[in-house]
Image (cartoon, rainbow, N blue to C red):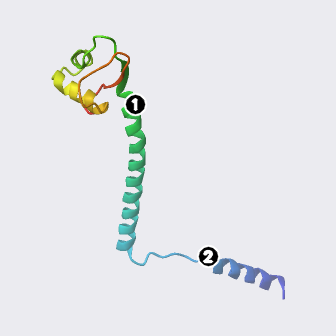
Amino acid sequence: MNQHEIIGQRRQAVTKKRKRLYIVNRARFVIMTLLTLIILSTVITYISGLFMSNASLSSNTLKIEISSGDTLWKIASKYNYYEEDVREVIYRIKSVNHMDSSDLMAGQSLIIPLTQNP
């Protein structure tokens, strides 16, 4: 076997290993590519939304300690940044803190939502 035959066999072996892929059905290829991109972007959006919701919740709240004589009305009036009905602010405070009544005790901690959407 001479050198040219050996080189020829190597070239054939290399070309046999590389199979070319051909798009047989272009419409199916486009649809599958689009579906893959949509699914991938949905997963990325969902995962980033999980991190964003945790970050936005912690930055849009304030933790305070109740002093003697504090009432929910006073606290809601103080933290009513959007000049809305004080009763709505009280409702949000009670919702975030899982309170059944409006009773407060000195030393108790409350989480105050600083946005209109807790």
Residue linked to disc 2: 18
Q: Position of residue 78 (x, y in %)?
A: 26, 15
In this view, the residue in front, 89 or 99, is 99
Residue 79 is labelled as: none
In the rendered structure, the answer to whether residue 6 lies left or right of residue 84 reads right
- Name the residue at 37% across, 33% down: 56
Identity of the residue furthest to the top in this view: 69
In this view, the residue in front, 113 or 47, is 113
Identity of the residue furthest to the bottom in this view: 1
Q: Is residue 13 above or below residue 53?
A: below
First of labels 1, 2 by sequence position: 2
In the rendered structure, the answer to whether residue 48 lies left or right of residue 92 reads right
Residue linked to disc 1: 58
Quadrant hosting residue 108: top left
| Mark 1 residue element | helix
Q: Say what amino acid the circle numbered 1 marks.
A: Ser
In this view, the residue in front, 2 or 114, is 114
In the rendered structure, the answer to whether residue 88 lies left or right of residue 10 reads left
Real-space CA distance between mark 1 and mark 2, rounded to the nearest whole angstrom:
54 Å
In this view, the residue in front, 84 or 65, is 65
In the rendered structure, the answer to whether residue 102 lies left or right of residue 20 reads left
Disc 1: CA contacts within 10 A as few (<14), some (14-19) or many (>=20): few
Q: Is residue 80 visible?
A: no
- Name the residue at 34% across, 12% down: 67
Q: Is residue 4 visible?
A: yes
Q: Position of residue 1 (x, y in %)?
A: 84, 88
Q: Position of residue 53 (x, y in %)?
A: 37, 39
Q: Position of residue 116 (x, y in %)?
A: 24, 29
| Mark 2 residue element | loop
Image quadrant for the C terminus? Answer: top left
Q: Say what amino acid the circle numbered 2 marks.
A: Arg
